[in-house]
Image (cartoon, rainbow, N blue to C red):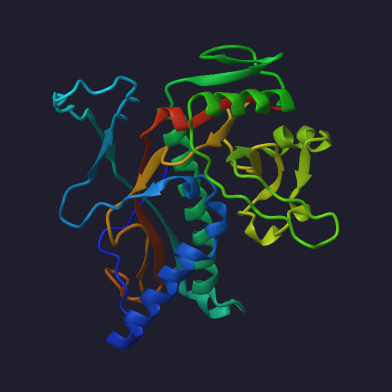
Protein backbone atom coordinates (compact mmCIF):
# COMPACT_ATOMS: atom_id res chain seq x y z
CA UNK A 1 0.00 0.00 0.00
CA UNK A 2 1.64 3.24 -1.15
CA UNK A 3 0.88 5.86 1.47
CA UNK A 4 2.61 9.15 2.22
CA UNK A 5 2.91 11.43 5.24
CA UNK A 6 3.64 15.14 5.71
CA UNK A 7 6.30 16.13 8.22
CA UNK A 8 5.45 19.07 10.40
CA UNK A 9 1.85 19.45 9.25
CA UNK A 10 -0.02 21.02 12.15
CA UNK A 11 -3.39 22.62 12.80
CA UNK A 12 -2.99 26.40 12.87
CA UNK A 13 -6.37 28.12 13.08
CA UNK A 14 -7.01 31.59 14.43
CA UNK A 15 -7.11 30.85 18.15
CA UNK A 16 -6.13 28.25 20.70
CA UNK A 17 -9.80 27.57 21.46
CA UNK A 18 -10.74 27.03 17.82
CA UNK A 19 -7.59 24.95 17.28
CA UNK A 20 -8.55 22.54 20.04
CA UNK A 21 -12.17 22.45 18.89
CA UNK A 22 -11.26 21.82 15.23
CA UNK A 23 -8.69 19.17 16.12
CA UNK A 24 -11.19 17.30 18.31
CA UNK A 25 -13.95 17.54 15.69
CA UNK A 26 -11.87 16.29 12.77
CA UNK A 27 -10.20 13.58 14.88
CA UNK A 28 -13.67 12.37 15.85
CA UNK A 29 -14.90 12.36 12.25
CA UNK A 30 -11.76 10.55 11.12
CA UNK A 31 -12.09 7.80 13.72
CA UNK A 32 -15.83 7.26 13.93
CA UNK A 33 -17.55 8.18 10.65
CA UNK A 34 -16.69 4.83 9.06
CA UNK A 35 -16.29 2.58 12.07
CA UNK A 36 -18.65 0.08 10.42
CA UNK A 37 -15.81 -0.82 8.01
CA UNK A 38 -13.61 -2.16 10.83
CA UNK A 39 -14.90 -5.73 10.71
CA UNK A 40 -11.68 -7.61 11.51
CA UNK A 41 -10.64 -5.40 14.42
CA UNK A 42 -13.77 -6.08 16.50
CA UNK A 43 -12.60 -9.63 17.27
CA UNK A 44 -9.18 -8.67 18.61
CA UNK A 45 -8.15 -7.48 22.07
CA UNK A 46 -7.07 -3.81 22.04
CA UNK A 47 -3.73 -3.31 23.82
CA UNK A 48 -2.24 0.13 23.07
CA UNK A 49 1.43 0.74 23.82
CA UNK A 50 1.93 3.38 26.56
CA UNK A 51 3.67 6.57 25.50
CA UNK A 52 7.48 6.64 25.63
CA UNK A 53 7.82 2.84 25.94
CA UNK A 54 8.89 1.98 22.40
CA UNK A 55 6.98 0.68 19.39
CA UNK A 56 6.91 -3.06 20.11
CA UNK A 57 4.16 -4.70 22.19
CA UNK A 58 5.25 -7.67 24.30
CA UNK A 59 2.30 -10.04 24.67
CA UNK A 60 2.81 -12.81 27.22
CA UNK A 61 0.77 -16.00 26.93
CA UNK A 62 0.65 -18.72 29.57
CA UNK A 63 0.26 -22.44 29.00
CA UNK A 64 -2.82 -23.87 30.69
CA UNK A 65 -2.34 -26.02 33.77
CA UNK A 66 -3.12 -29.72 33.21
CA UNK A 67 -6.14 -31.52 34.59
CA UNK A 68 -5.25 -33.28 37.87
CA UNK A 69 -6.48 -36.88 38.11
CA UNK A 70 -4.09 -38.35 40.68
CA UNK A 71 -4.85 -38.23 44.39
CA UNK A 72 -2.42 -36.45 46.67
CA UNK A 73 -0.20 -38.84 48.69
CA UNK A 74 -1.07 -38.55 52.35
CA UNK A 75 1.07 -35.96 54.10
CA UNK A 76 3.11 -35.13 50.98
CA UNK A 77 3.08 -31.63 49.52
CA UNK A 78 3.33 -31.71 45.70
CA UNK A 79 6.18 -29.90 43.99
CA UNK A 80 5.38 -26.40 42.83
CA UNK A 81 4.46 -26.32 39.15
CA UNK A 82 6.46 -23.97 36.94
CA UNK A 83 4.42 -21.62 34.79
CA UNK A 84 5.28 -21.77 31.09
CA UNK A 85 5.22 -18.28 29.61
CA UNK A 86 5.69 -17.46 25.92
CA UNK A 87 6.59 -13.95 24.86
CA UNK A 88 5.25 -12.65 21.53
CA UNK A 89 6.29 -9.35 20.01
CA UNK A 90 4.02 -7.17 17.88
CA UNK A 91 5.65 -4.40 15.84
CA UNK A 92 3.80 -1.11 15.33
CA UNK A 93 4.06 0.78 12.04
CA UNK A 94 2.79 4.18 10.92
CA UNK A 95 0.46 4.72 7.97
CA UNK A 96 -1.12 7.83 6.52
CA UNK A 97 -2.01 9.92 3.50
CA UNK A 98 -2.35 13.57 2.46
CA UNK A 99 -4.77 15.42 0.17
CA UNK A 100 -4.21 18.88 -1.27
CA UNK A 101 -6.72 21.72 -1.66
CA UNK A 102 -6.04 24.76 -3.85
CA UNK A 103 -7.32 28.24 -3.10
CA UNK A 104 -9.31 28.23 -6.36
CA UNK A 105 -11.13 25.01 -5.41
CA UNK A 106 -11.80 26.35 -1.94
CA UNK A 107 -13.26 29.61 -3.29
CA UNK A 108 -15.38 28.13 -6.11
CA UNK A 109 -16.77 24.96 -4.53
CA UNK A 110 -20.34 24.96 -3.20
CA UNK A 111 -19.48 22.24 -0.65
CA UNK A 112 -17.51 22.61 2.60
CA UNK A 113 -14.31 21.22 1.09
CA UNK A 114 -12.45 20.42 4.30
CA UNK A 115 -15.38 18.52 5.84
CA UNK A 116 -15.81 16.57 2.63
CA UNK A 117 -12.14 15.60 2.44
CA UNK A 118 -11.95 14.52 6.09
CA UNK A 119 -15.07 12.37 5.61
CA UNK A 120 -13.52 10.73 2.56
CA UNK A 121 -10.25 10.24 4.40
CA UNK A 122 -12.17 8.62 7.25
CA UNK A 123 -13.41 5.97 4.82
CA UNK A 124 -9.92 5.66 3.34
CA UNK A 125 -8.33 5.18 6.75
CA UNK A 126 -10.97 2.71 7.98
CA UNK A 127 -10.66 0.53 4.88
CA UNK A 128 -6.85 0.76 5.03
CA UNK A 129 -6.92 -0.21 8.70
CA UNK A 130 -9.27 -3.14 8.11
CA UNK A 131 -7.12 -4.35 5.19
CA UNK A 132 -3.89 -4.11 7.18
CA UNK A 133 -5.34 -5.97 10.18
CA UNK A 134 -6.79 -8.61 7.84
CA UNK A 135 -3.40 -9.17 6.21
CA UNK A 136 -1.57 -9.20 9.55
CA UNK A 137 -3.91 -11.91 10.84
CA UNK A 138 -4.05 -14.10 7.72
CA UNK A 139 -0.27 -13.83 7.37
CA UNK A 140 0.27 -14.81 11.01
CA UNK A 141 -1.82 -18.00 10.98
CA UNK A 142 0.11 -21.27 11.37
CA UNK A 143 -2.34 -23.57 9.56
CA UNK A 144 -4.70 -22.55 6.77
CA UNK A 145 -7.46 -25.02 5.85
CA UNK A 146 -8.94 -25.65 2.40
CA UNK A 147 -12.62 -26.46 2.04
CA UNK A 148 -12.73 -29.62 -0.04
CA UNK A 149 -15.45 -32.21 -0.62
CA UNK A 150 -16.51 -33.38 2.84
CA UNK A 151 -13.28 -32.18 4.45
CA UNK A 152 -11.17 -29.31 5.72
CA UNK A 153 -7.66 -30.04 4.45
CA UNK A 154 -4.77 -28.33 6.26
CA UNK A 155 -1.91 -26.51 4.53
CA UNK A 156 -2.73 -27.14 0.86
CA UNK A 157 -5.55 -28.24 -1.40
CA UNK A 158 -8.01 -27.22 -4.06
CA UNK A 159 -10.79 -25.23 -2.44
CA UNK A 160 -14.45 -25.55 -3.39
CA UNK A 161 -17.40 -23.32 -2.49
CA UNK A 162 -18.34 -23.08 1.19
CA UNK A 163 -21.07 -25.49 2.29
CA UNK A 164 -22.92 -26.24 5.52
CA UNK A 165 -20.82 -29.40 5.90
CA UNK A 166 -17.70 -27.23 6.17
CA UNK A 167 -19.26 -25.19 8.97
CA UNK A 168 -20.06 -28.46 10.76
CA UNK A 169 -16.35 -29.32 10.56
CA UNK A 170 -15.37 -25.86 11.82
CA UNK A 171 -17.70 -26.26 14.77
CA UNK A 172 -16.24 -29.68 15.56
CA UNK A 173 -12.71 -28.28 15.27
CA UNK A 174 -13.45 -25.58 17.86
CA UNK A 175 -15.30 -27.99 20.15
CA UNK A 176 -12.43 -30.48 20.08
CA UNK A 177 -10.00 -27.65 20.84
CA UNK A 178 -12.27 -26.54 23.73
CA UNK A 179 -12.51 -23.02 22.34
CA UNK A 180 -14.91 -20.99 24.51
CA UNK A 181 -17.85 -19.41 22.72
CA UNK A 182 -17.74 -15.67 22.21
CA UNK A 183 -21.47 -14.92 22.16
CA UNK A 184 -24.18 -15.42 24.75
CA UNK A 185 -27.63 -16.87 24.29
CA UNK A 186 -30.21 -14.47 22.86
CA UNK A 187 -33.40 -15.61 24.57
CA UNK A 188 -36.61 -16.13 22.56
CA UNK A 189 -38.93 -13.18 22.25
CA UNK A 190 -42.64 -12.67 21.67
CA UNK A 191 -42.37 -11.45 18.06
CA UNK A 192 -43.84 -13.44 15.17
CA UNK A 193 -41.50 -16.25 14.05
CA UNK A 194 -38.73 -14.96 16.32
CA UNK A 195 -36.10 -17.52 17.24
CA UNK A 196 -33.60 -17.82 20.10
CA UNK A 197 -29.94 -17.58 19.15
CA UNK A 198 -27.62 -19.98 20.92
CA UNK A 199 -24.13 -19.11 22.14
CA UNK A 200 -21.49 -19.55 19.49
CA UNK A 201 -18.69 -18.05 17.40
CA UNK A 202 -18.49 -15.50 14.58
CA UNK A 203 -17.61 -16.32 10.98
CA UNK A 204 -16.35 -13.51 8.77
CA UNK A 205 -17.09 -14.60 5.21
CA UNK A 206 -17.55 -13.16 1.74
CA UNK A 207 -21.14 -12.63 0.50
CA UNK A 208 -20.78 -15.35 -2.14
CA UNK A 209 -19.37 -17.76 0.46
CA UNK A 210 -22.26 -17.24 2.87
CA UNK A 211 -25.04 -17.04 0.28
CA UNK A 212 -25.40 -20.84 -0.30
CA UNK A 213 -25.76 -21.42 3.47
CA UNK A 214 -28.97 -19.38 3.57
CA UNK A 215 -30.91 -22.17 1.86
CA UNK A 216 -30.00 -24.72 4.55
CA UNK A 217 -32.71 -25.79 6.99
CA UNK A 218 -30.38 -24.98 9.93
CA UNK A 219 -30.04 -21.35 8.80
CA UNK A 220 -31.77 -18.46 10.61
CA UNK A 221 -31.95 -14.99 9.08
CA UNK A 222 -30.88 -12.15 11.37
CA UNK A 223 -34.28 -10.45 11.16
CA UNK A 224 -35.83 -13.47 12.87
CA UNK A 225 -33.52 -13.29 15.87
CA UNK A 226 -35.47 -12.82 19.08
CA UNK A 227 -33.55 -9.56 19.53
CA UNK A 228 -32.13 -8.43 16.17
CA UNK A 229 -30.64 -5.38 17.86
CA UNK A 230 -28.02 -7.63 19.43
CA UNK A 231 -26.61 -8.53 16.01
CA UNK A 232 -23.19 -7.08 15.14
CA UNK A 233 -22.26 -4.96 12.13
CA UNK A 234 -22.70 -6.93 8.90
CA UNK A 235 -24.35 -9.96 10.54
CA UNK A 236 -26.82 -11.67 8.20
CA UNK A 237 -27.79 -14.80 10.11
CA UNK A 238 -26.59 -17.94 11.83
CA UNK A 239 -25.94 -21.60 11.14
CA UNK A 240 -26.05 -23.76 14.28
CA UNK A 241 -23.26 -22.44 16.56
CA UNK A 242 -21.90 -19.96 14.02
CA UNK A 243 -23.15 -16.42 13.50
CA UNK A 244 -22.21 -15.18 10.02
CA UNK A 245 -20.98 -11.72 9.05
CA UNK A 246 -20.67 -10.68 5.41
CA UNK A 247 -17.39 -8.95 4.60
CA UNK A 248 -16.61 -7.47 1.20
CA UNK A 249 -13.00 -6.83 2.26
CA UNK A 250 -12.13 -10.45 2.94
CA UNK A 251 -8.60 -11.57 2.06
CA UNK A 252 -8.31 -13.35 -1.28
CA UNK A 253 -5.55 -14.51 -3.61
CA UNK A 254 -7.61 -14.03 -6.77
CA UNK A 255 -8.92 -17.60 -6.62
CA UNK A 256 -9.89 -18.34 -3.01
CA UNK A 257 -11.45 -16.42 -0.12
CA UNK A 258 -9.88 -16.65 3.35
CA UNK A 259 -12.92 -16.97 5.63
CA UNK A 260 -12.19 -16.54 9.36
CA UNK A 261 -13.87 -18.22 12.33
CA UNK A 262 -13.13 -16.22 15.48
CA UNK A 263 -12.82 -17.49 19.03
CA UNK A 264 -12.07 -15.35 22.12
CA UNK A 265 -8.65 -13.88 22.93
CA UNK A 266 -7.20 -15.09 19.64
CA UNK A 267 -5.17 -11.97 18.91
CA UNK A 268 -4.35 -8.35 19.69
CA UNK A 269 -4.45 -5.04 17.87
CA UNK A 270 -2.14 -2.31 19.08
CA UNK A 271 -0.87 1.18 18.38
CA UNK A 272 0.90 4.02 20.15
CA UNK A 273 -1.37 5.28 22.93
CA UNK A 274 -2.82 8.65 21.93
CA UNK A 275 -1.67 8.23 18.32
CA UNK A 276 -4.00 5.49 17.08
CA UNK A 277 -5.37 7.95 14.50
CA UNK A 278 -5.07 11.72 14.14
CA UNK A 279 -6.03 14.39 11.62
CA UNK A 280 -3.53 17.03 10.47
CA UNK A 281 -3.90 20.29 8.51
CA UNK A 282 -1.25 22.51 6.96
CA UNK A 283 -3.41 25.61 6.28
CA UNK A 284 -3.18 28.12 3.47
CA UNK A 285 -0.01 30.18 3.93
CA UNK A 286 1.98 27.55 5.83
CA UNK A 287 5.54 26.71 4.88
CA UNK A 288 6.59 28.32 1.58
CA UNK A 289 2.98 28.99 0.50
CA UNK A 290 3.48 32.78 0.43
CA UNK A 291 0.44 33.41 -1.81
CA UNK A 292 -1.90 31.21 0.25
CA UNK A 293 -2.56 28.87 -2.69
CA UNK A 294 -2.33 25.47 -1.03
CA UNK A 295 -3.84 23.70 1.95
CA UNK A 296 -2.95 20.13 2.88
CA UNK A 297 -5.16 17.78 4.86
CA UNK A 298 -3.88 14.43 6.10
CA UNK A 299 -4.21 11.61 8.57
CA UNK A 300 -1.78 9.31 10.34
CA UNK A 301 -2.24 6.20 12.45
CA UNK A 302 -0.04 3.70 14.24
CA UNK A 303 -1.01 0.05 13.97
CA UNK A 304 0.08 -3.50 14.60
CA UNK A 305 -1.82 -6.79 15.00
CA UNK A 306 -0.98 -10.42 15.62
CA UNK A 307 -2.43 -13.79 16.58
CA UNK A 308 -1.71 -14.81 20.17
CA UNK A 309 -3.66 -18.08 20.39
CA UNK A 310 -3.63 -20.14 17.21
CA UNK A 311 -6.17 -22.69 18.49
CA UNK A 312 -8.83 -19.96 18.85
CA UNK A 313 -8.92 -18.85 15.21
CA UNK A 314 -9.60 -20.81 12.03
CA UNK A 315 -8.87 -19.62 8.47
CA UNK A 316 -10.67 -21.63 5.78
CA UNK A 317 -10.11 -21.01 2.10
CA UNK A 318 -13.10 -21.39 -0.21
CA UNK A 319 -13.47 -20.95 -3.96
CA UNK A 320 -14.36 -17.48 -5.21
CA UNK A 321 -17.56 -17.85 -7.24
Q: Quadrant of residue 288?
A: bottom left
Which residue appears at 70% of the width and 19% of the height? 160
Query: Can you give x and y, in whole percent of width and height, for residue 126 in the image?
Result: 50, 54
Which residue appears at 52% of the width and 73% of the height? 115
Q: Is residue 8 something one can see in this rendering?
A: yes
Query: Can you give x and y, in whole percent of width and height, for residue 114 in the image?
Result: 49, 73
Q: Is residue 254 something one can see in this rendering?
A: no
- Work out whether 25 lies above or below 47: below
- Work out whether 54 lies above or below 227: above
Nearest the viewer among 104 and 187 is: 187
Query: Can you give x and y, in whole percent of width and height, for residue 33 in the image?
Result: 53, 65
Residue that extends furthest to the front in the rendered view of this protein: 74
Query: Can you give x and y, in whole percent of width and height, for residue 157 in the image?
Result: 60, 11
In the drawing, does residue 267 fall left or right of residue 165? left
Which residue appears at 37% of the width and 46% of the height? 269
Q: Quadrant of residue 77?
A: top left
- Work out whether 167 lies above or below 197: above
Position of the C terminus by quadrant: top right
Nearest the viewer among 197 and 57 is: 197
Total count of labels? 0
- Work out whether 188 lies above or below 221: below
Which residue appears at 60% of the width and 38% of the height? 203
In the drawing, does residue 251 fall left or right of residue 228? left
In the drawing, does residue 21 fall left or right of residue 10? right
Position of the N terminus by quadrant: top left
Amino acid sequence: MALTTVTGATVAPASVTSAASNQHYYDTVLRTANRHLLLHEQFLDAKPIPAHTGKVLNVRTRAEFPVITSALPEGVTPSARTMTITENYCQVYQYGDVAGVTDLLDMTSNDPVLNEIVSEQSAQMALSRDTLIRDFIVGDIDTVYYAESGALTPTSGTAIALAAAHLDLMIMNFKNAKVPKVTKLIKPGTGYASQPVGAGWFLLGSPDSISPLRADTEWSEVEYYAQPGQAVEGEVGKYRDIRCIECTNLHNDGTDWSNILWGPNCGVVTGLDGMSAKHYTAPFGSGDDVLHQRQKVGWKMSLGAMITKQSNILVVKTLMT
